[in-house]
Image: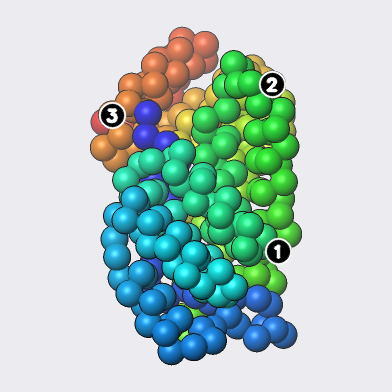
Amino acid sequence: MKKSILNFAGLLGVLLVAGILPAQQASPPSKVPPQAKTQQEYADYTSAYALSGGATAEKAASDFAAKHPQSELRAYLYAKAMHDYQNENNPGKMLSMGENVLGLDPDNSIALVLTATVLADSLSDGDHDREQKIAEVKKNSNRALQTLDSSFIPPPGATAEQVAAYKSTLQSMAYSALGIMELKTGDAPGAERDLRSAVDRNKTQPDPYIWYHLALAQDKQNKYPEALASITQALQNMGSNADLAKLANGERERLLQLTGGTPPSGQKPPP
């Protein structure tokens, strides 16, 4: 199944590459933003940031950090590598790069929500470090929600609507990670609450992955009509995700049987 990290790739690509990345990494407005201390440091940073591809960007970030171990710009390059690995659907490396970013900038909103999302998506009953993963999802998601207003600094020229959309997307990701983790740990009411918060904050680009898991959380509480409405939303916004569509269609058929074969009021069945 395509993981939820990819459903946010387009907007986060804007955040990371088209000008917000340096500002996002910056300290709160009362502090001096990170900057190069020498022309050589800035030239090396610019050259490294221009490189693309997860492995290439990671090596460039590591080489820059080795050459400039005190540079305030190191987190930018690890965040760039994190984004490139996101585009390559490599969650393990995304997590590693995100941890590097957080080691340098603990309140980096994008790194917080992406690491929480990777951990929640990969959580399974057989994990030897299951409790550690659960704790990390909670910590990173809640920290992102608590610090977003103070740590997120928009780039020059960003409109109020763009800033609101960026923040809503990050909030949606944080709540989604919490909800999926809660669903996998048996807390269906908590999962429904947080997944509902996630969909409420992402109305312009509805995410079928979140709607699907919301349906599962409602199903586990025997809320079959509500679950059927949620799975219908998932299918109506499915796009080309064939694996998720197969799972969602199976869930929909089950829910139709449980509800007597009646689609939710006011909703057309998906094609």
Reading the image, the residue beneath label 2 is 186
* Residue 41 occupies quadrant: bottom left
Instruction: Report whether residue 135 is seen.
Output: yes
Residue beneath the point at 54% across and 42% down = 117
> Rounded to the nearest whole Å, what is the CA distance between mark 2 and mark 3?
27 Å
Q: Is residue 111 above or below residue 160?
A: above
Measured from the top left, where is residue 25 in percent x and y? Answer: 56, 70
| Secondary structure at numbered mark 1 | helix
Reading the image, the residue beneath label 1 is 147
Q: Is residue 21 left or right of residue 197?
A: left
Q: Is residue 168 left or right of residue 205?
A: right
Name the front one of labels 1 and 3: 1
Reading the image, the residue beneath label 3 is 242
Measured from the top left, where is residue 23 in percent x and y? Answer: 53, 76
Depth check: give the residue in front, 49 or 231: 49
Q: Residue furthest front?
A: 67
Measured from the top left, where is residue 185 in percent x and y? Answer: 68, 24
Depth check: give the residue in front, 261 or 109: 109
Residue type at mark 3: give it. Ala
